[in-house]
Image: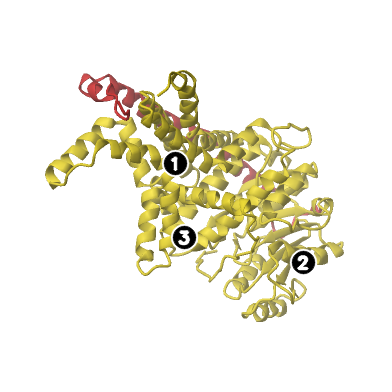
Chain colours: A red, B yellow
Amino acid sequence: VTVEPGGGHEPEIFKREIQTAVRFERGLVIKAIAVLVAVAVVVILRALYFVLPVFRASDDSQEGTCR
Amino acid sequence: MTHGLIVGGEWILIAIVLAGALPEVAAAWQFLLASGHFWRNHYGACEPVFPRTVVLIPAWNEGAVIGESIDRLMRAEYPKESLRVIVVDDASTDDTPLVVKAKETQYPGQVMYLRREKGGQGKAHTLNHGLAVALSDAWMESLLITDADVIFEPAALRTLTRHLADPEVGAVTAYIKEGSRPGNYLTRFIGYEYLTAQSAARRGQNVLGAVACLAGGAQLHSRANLVGLGGRIDTSSLAEDTITTFETQLHGYRVVFEPHAICWAEEPDTINGLWKQRLRWARGNVTLTARYRRVWFRPSRMHGLGGLTFGIVWFCLFLQPVFMISASAALLTLYFAGSPSAWPAFRVLWIINAVTFLFITGFALLIDTGTARRSWRQAVMFPGAVNLAIILYTCFPRLLTDATHWFFDHSGLPPPPVSSVIVFVYGWLGGSLAVAYLAKAAEPKWAGRLVSPLIVYIVGYGSVLCACTFASYVKELRRAEMRWDKTEKIGKMRIRG
């Protein structure tokens, strides 16, 4: 392919854009971890909800069976 | 219930119920992979290259949109002497020829108009007409296939071409966003869907080293790749984009998704328009899945298409309607057989769905905040109101039970029998596909414009897509005629820049 600078798009601009793109991709890891932590918090809260005696009765029920 | 069923059959049924969560788990796995794009991407092999590029635009009655698209391409941040546009008119009956010929005059030597007098054979035939002309001239080093309505952001083309500096790369695809303005509820659903299916899932495919599909409206090929493909696009299916993607990789070239090359496209704003488009795509996927039966789950050094993870993700999503229907059928069988496992299996299934839904939605909205601002409501409502209620009920049974009791106590309405509610929620996963079909069926009726959006919000946009996939199975089994039902574009995009 033709390797030539063109239209004012010099290698410095290219380098900066690649760095920006890689930085954005690194940021995605942080975002993914943040969301995973948030989901884990919801799951833990739900588990605690189970533990509370006031709710236990309904969760131990056999709802959804034909018996 | 027989003793044999209790011992063995019950476990099989429970497994089938839990398999209903596989498509969601597969989708979440792709999202997790997407977060690994920072260490496994193609940026290290990029160079600031500007190959002599031909942009190939197939056009049929695109007078409303094609002039703007050509103007935008001519304003691209790309050397003018290295850019040409070929428009292949597929026997348009509107003012497309006049518009393109005016552009030919406006951009002498850069825009070329070709016309097929016998049109209507499909996009692949139209592309092949232009491809033959482009390949006959040694000037061309790379070829960008796009659609007449697609608007490229100024930096998009040069962001794509930099990947071709690596001779191992045969094709590069961009992130196509939904650009209708002001748009409606459906275009916002599509905007969010494209965020998940492209910006997230294709990043994950980059990490896997196997890309499932080059976007039909933004695929850049090296000349060597096109020559390797025989100089023509496959015309035997409705999924020429996906076939091209697979063939490129099977020939040993790499396919790259470039999430920072952005373009905009006009997508359907009616359920029937969406159905027509997606049925075409889904039928193409059925053909493709059968055609490459010797590729799946057979790892190769040449390509990643035979990888275990890629195969699992492909089949989980391709067979999503089957998983949904069989999960419901298994739950109902357990219920009517009086099995105590029905309820726990149902809850585990939906708790998995809830966790994956939370992760996918949260992460997707953070990946592309622009689309998130516009489509966050559609992201939340993607599974539909009924599925969200089931998720709430399975995760927090007491909340919904109390609310339901309160409602019936205060409304004076008689509560429905518990058994009918249970049958409804157990059967909903599969039954939602039939209800989703109603959104399509109701739309042309006098009140359909009001009822259809309501149905979509109730059953979920995801169920509409699954119903469409299911319809594609039926069409393929019946060997229905493969018609190229083109999506009509009327120029709804208002993109600045």
Q: CA distance from mark 1 to mark 2?
A: 41 Å
Q: Provide residue B27's location: percent of width, then percent of height.
A: 53, 38
Mark 1 / mark 3, whichever is N-terminal: 3
Identity of the residue drawn at 35% across and 44% down: B386
Q: Provide residue B278's location: percent of width, then percent of height.
A: 56, 55
- Quadrant housing the C terminus of chain B: bottom right
Residue bearing mark 3: B271
| Residue type, label 2 | Gly
Q: Which quadrant of the view contains residue B262?
A: bottom right
Say if B50 sits above or below B386 in the image: below
Mark 3 element type: helix
The tag on residue B361 is: 1
Q: CA distance from mark 1 to mark 3?
A: 23 Å
> Which of these two is toward me, B434 or A50?
B434
> Which of these two is toward me, B245 or B292?
B292
Chain holding disc 1: B
